Amino acid sequence: QVQLQESGPGLVQPSENLSLSCTVSGGSVSSANDYWSWIRQPPGKGMEWIGYIHYSGSTQYNPSLKSRVTISVDTSQNHFFLNLGSVTAADTAIYYCAKERILSGGITRGFDYWGQGTLVTVSS
Amino acid sequence: QSALTQPASVSGSPGQSITISCTGTSNNIGNYNLVSWYQQHPGKAPKLIIYEVGKRPSGVSNRFFGSKSGNTASLTISGLQAEDEADYHCCSHVGNSTFRLFGGGTKLTVL
């Protein structure tokens, strides 16, 4: 059973960087058909896909966040990471890491495993 | 990209059936059978209940049924139970890309 756990600061100052990590257990970030995403949910609102990374290093980002986002992976430690720059109050949200299985031809089996989420508040 | 459109809330009595809609465009739901649905209880992580429009992961009750017509996907829950009370989110692949688009979420109340 794959388990994911987010970690990082709960409070970030405006204009600074938001950095989170996701520890994967019970599975490997190096699995060929698994892609590792960050998804966020502002309090009381719907979810927003931030982007994903494949163990090969391939990344895709939400165009609305692309200029501020970097997702990276450490296969030796089975972790992956989110860095979001120049944050504002609008970036306050619960941040989830999640696994998505994508088969050949781009067929996605959905986000089948999720972390519990971590609330990040942007405030001075 | 605008979020997929879901009703803010739906309700039903135990034993009844309800349907939650998720409306997009031809650039997402309309031309791709890559819609997934997630159940989220308060304070909990989302749980995948439907993928590829109408497929259920192992262990998900067959009371959950997914379908699609045109640009609208739907989630039907039959035989409503108190434990079904939760938020439900739809998600779709977008265009010729790897972008994922969510709906705004629907709160299901079991009366």
Image: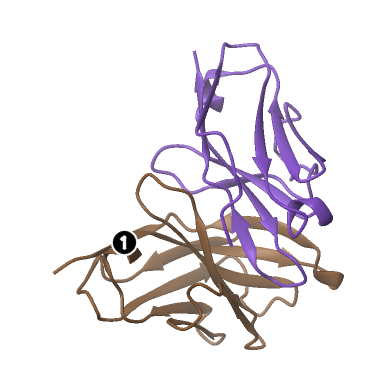
Chain containing mark 1: A
From the top left corner, tell me how far across and down residue A26 is, in percent.
59, 65
* Residue shown at 76% from the left, 30% from the top: B62
Q: Which residue is mark 1?
A: A92
Q: Position of residue A54 (x, y in %)?
A: 65, 80
**In the image: residue A3, left or right of residue B54:** left
- Relative to B79, is B32 above or below? below
In x, y percent, where is residue A122? 24, 66
Up/down of B50 relative to B7, above or below: below
Q: Which chain is brown?
A: A
Res A76 visible: yes
Residue found 67% across the figure and 88% down from its top: A56
Q: Residues within 10 Å of mark 1 (few under 14, many from 20)?
A: many
Q: Helix, strand, or loop for circle 1?
A: loop
The amino acid sitting under disc 1 is Thr
Residue ranking furthest to the left: A124
A39 vs A88, left or right, is right
At x 70%, y 76%, the residue is A31
* Image quarter of the N terminus of chain B: bottom right
The one nearer the camera, A56 or B71, is B71
Asked which colour scheme the image uses, the reply is by chain
Chain letter for the purple part: B
Residues B89 and B61: in front is B89
